[in-house]
Image (cartoon, coloured by chain):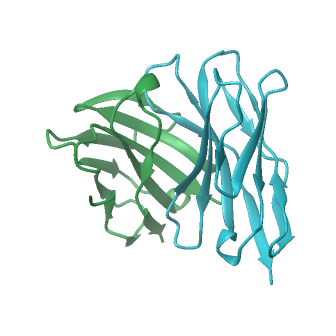
């Protein structure tokens, strides 16, 4: 079974600065998706960024980028120019492509606080 | 396009009762997944339905069940409620399965409190 580990329960960042959230995962599969989801106090889970395991290139979405190290099974999220609206719980998630279905396996989450 | 709609948003039930939660996926999406979110256990997968068939099931007791209708709307039922069932229940819809599916869209959840 796949597992996802987020070792940072909580992180803080000053507005306009850069922060990196860590995520490691364990799988024996070679084909999968990795995601970062954001959950603000409204509880709505919002997709931040997605990475396909067979793609070498790290995904980027505006101020959000990932460092995907497949051999190390590491998938960190970098948020540049942090904004107050980035404050939320961030979840790293894994989805198998080899298995049938859309089941997501989530990490425990990291609370991100942004200071003004 | 309307997003994923979960009803009700809040529920308070008494131990031993049963409850039904509803999820209307994004129009055209055929896959609906359910997750339980608690402070202690985090986000855990309950089950997934695709075209009215349960495709995948998490490690939850038989008190947790679900179904999907021909219009892709899904319901989740919990019978004989226990205090530990208090949680945020999230529903996610996806247009497809496997490699073709690149994203799950979540609803705002139903907050269930069992007293």
In the rendered view, does A105 fall on the left or right side of B60?
right
**Residue closest to the far bottom:** A116
- Residue B80 appears in view: yes
Q: Nearer the viewer, residue A13 or A94?
A: A13
From the image, state the color of chain B. green
Q: Quadrant of residue B23?
A: bottom left
Q: Residue at x 66, y 51 (%)?
A: A91
Q: Quadrant of residue A32?
A: top right
Q: Note whether A103 is above or below A43 in the view shown.
A: above
Number of labels in the image equals 0
Q: Quadrant of residue A23?
A: top right
Q: Residue at x 54, y 37 (%)?
A: A104
Q: Note whether B58 is above or below A115 in the view shown.
A: above
Q: Note whether B23 is above or below A30 in the view shown.
A: below
Q: Residue A56: x percent and y percent?
A: 71, 25
In the rendered view, does B40 fall on the left or right side of B16?
right
Q: Residue at x 33, y 37 (%)?
A: B95
From the image, state the color of chain A. cyan
Q: Residue at x 32, y 49 (%)?
A: B76
């Amino acid at each position: 079974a796949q597992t996802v580990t987020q070792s940072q329960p909580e992180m803080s960042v000053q507005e306009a600065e850069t922060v990196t959230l860590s995520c490691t995962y364990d799988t024996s599969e070679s084909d999968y998706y990795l995601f970062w989801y954001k959950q603000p106090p409204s509880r709505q889970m919002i997709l931040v960024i997605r990475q396909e395991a067979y793609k070498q290139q790290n995904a980027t979405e505006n101020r959000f980028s990932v460092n995907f190290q497949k051999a190390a099974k590491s998938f960190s999220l970098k948020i540049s120019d942090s904004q107050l609206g980035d404050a939320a719980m961030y979840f790293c998630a894994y989805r198998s492509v080899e298995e049938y279905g859309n089941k997501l396996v989530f990490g425990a989450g990291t609370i991100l606080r942004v200071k003004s | 396009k309307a997003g994923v709609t979960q009803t009700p948003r809040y529920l308070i039930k008494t131990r031993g009762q049963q409850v039904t939660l509803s999820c209307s996926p994004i129009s055209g999406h055929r896959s609906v997944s359910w997750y339980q979110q608690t402070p202690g256990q985090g986000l855990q997968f309950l089950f997934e339905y695709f075209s009215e068939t349960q495709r995948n099931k998490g490690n939850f007791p038989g008190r947790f069940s679900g179904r999907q209708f021909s219009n892709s709307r899904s319901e989740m039922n919990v019978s004989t409620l226990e205090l530990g069932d208090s949680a945020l229940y999230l529903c996610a819809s996806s247009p497809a399965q496997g490699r073709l599916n690149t994203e799950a869209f979540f609803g705002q959840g139903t907050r269930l409190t069992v007293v």
